[in-house]
Image: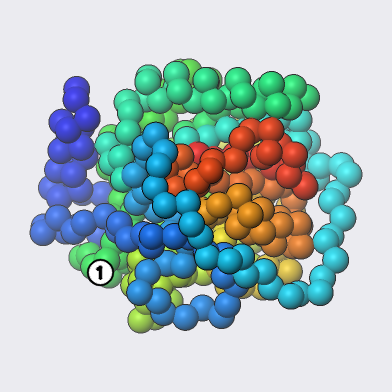
Amino acid sequence: MTLIALFCLIMSSFWFGGPRGEAQSKTGAQLVAQVPKTARVQYDTLQPTAAADISTESLTVNDGGGDSAAAPVVVPELNLEPQEAEEQPLTAGGIFPNNRVLAYYGFPGNADMGILGEYDPARLLELLREQARAYEEADPEHPVILAFEVIASVAQEEPQADGSYLLDTPSEVLDEYAEFTRDNGLLLILDVQIGYRTLANEIIGLKPWLSQNHVHLALDPEFAMQDGQIPGTHIGQVDEQDITYAQKWLVDLSAEVGGLPKMLIVHQFQQAMITNKDLVKPMVGVQLVIDADGWGVPENKRATYDFVNRVTHIEYHGIKLFYGQDVPLMEPTEIVNLDPSPLLVIYQ
């Protein structure tokens, strides 16, 4: 099946099928696709903007090029000392800390939303294995586990039938990627964009997939909207209580199905995206990763990573890289030498 045919199939499933949520659009609302020309790191109070300060979605993957200029790094003066990392993991038998997870991110069939949408799963796996070799050479002490991160609910600029500003990825597509990753020894990470739904609504709807041993969860606060906000125009947020709820839900799920500990990823590139972050704590039975999101030049990305994962250390650390927008793209040796070294690396 060609990419065009796959895309048509996916979109027809959106329009005519019955997704998990109530969000359906008979007019075919466009996937959010707004990006600024340059990225900038900015830690301010949440304010409406014409577009996200650092956009993390709807990015075309290409072979390079583009404008490498970027605005100056703006780092908050928090006067905080980095917290000391735990020497021993709280959750035994999990993926971390003995491994590094390397993931390709996106929406199936849509190249504008990440590399995962540019290729069919088989070709994507070939490319991911090639990328993994560079990380194994850069850090032989951490075996690389491969993963696909699939957007399971896609933010929209219109309310949709249930007012959620979301469209669900069709169940058939999630089944396809769950089966492919399981059969090929990969992890599957399901990314929820939340919109105006509750977090409970989002993750409970994904229970048939999250119950599978190799499937894990990611939260995308960028699109978790408050009253009056619109995805792609405002930058959203989740609270410590949301993260704690997700942790406990995953712990209970693992106990129910008898599976291995789950991984919970929370994306962040602005301070306001996680409120009461100082109250977020590790929880036995689930492994929490805060992922430094956003694209830009290496100086900007290091500043974002330092704020997200060093000043406010919680448990495990991640970073997202963008093949088309990070100019120049940081090398695997640079990534593994970050302090602390990220055990989750995502390419979009």
On the image, numbered disc 1 is attached to which residue? Answer: 159
Instruction: Give residue 254's position: percent from left, percent from top.
Output: 61, 40
> What is the quadrant of the C terminus in the image?
top left
63 left or right of 86 in image: left
Q: Please tell me which residue lies in front, 340 or 265.
A: 340
- For the point 21% across and 56% down, the residue is 30
Q: How is the image coloured?
A: rainbow
* Residue 125 vertical position relative to residue 112 in the rendered view, above or below: above
Q: Please tell me which residue lies in front, 316 or 170.
A: 316
Which image quarter: residue 195?
bottom left
Instruction: Give residue 181's position: percent from left, percent from top.
Output: 46, 25
Q: Is residue 43 visible?
A: yes
292 left or right of 164 in image: right
- For the point 64% across and 33% down, the residue is 332
Q: Please tell me which residue lies in front, 88 or 113.
A: 113
Instruction: Give residue 263's position: percent from left, percent from top.
Output: 62, 42
Which image quarter: residue 207?
top left
Q: Secondary structure at mark 1?
A: loop
* Residue 163 vertical position relative to residue 171 in the rendered view, above or below: below
Instruction: Give residue 322's position: percent from left, percent from top.
Output: 48, 44
167 left or right of 242 in image: left
- Dot 1, how many residues are within 10 Å of its Cα: few (below 14), some (14-19), or many (20+)? many
Q: Is residue 284 visible?
A: no
* Residue 194 vertical position relative to residue 136 in the rendered view, above or below: below
- For the point 67% across and 69% down, the residue is 75
Q: Amino acid at mark 1?
A: Pro
> What is the quadrant of the N terminus in the image?
top left
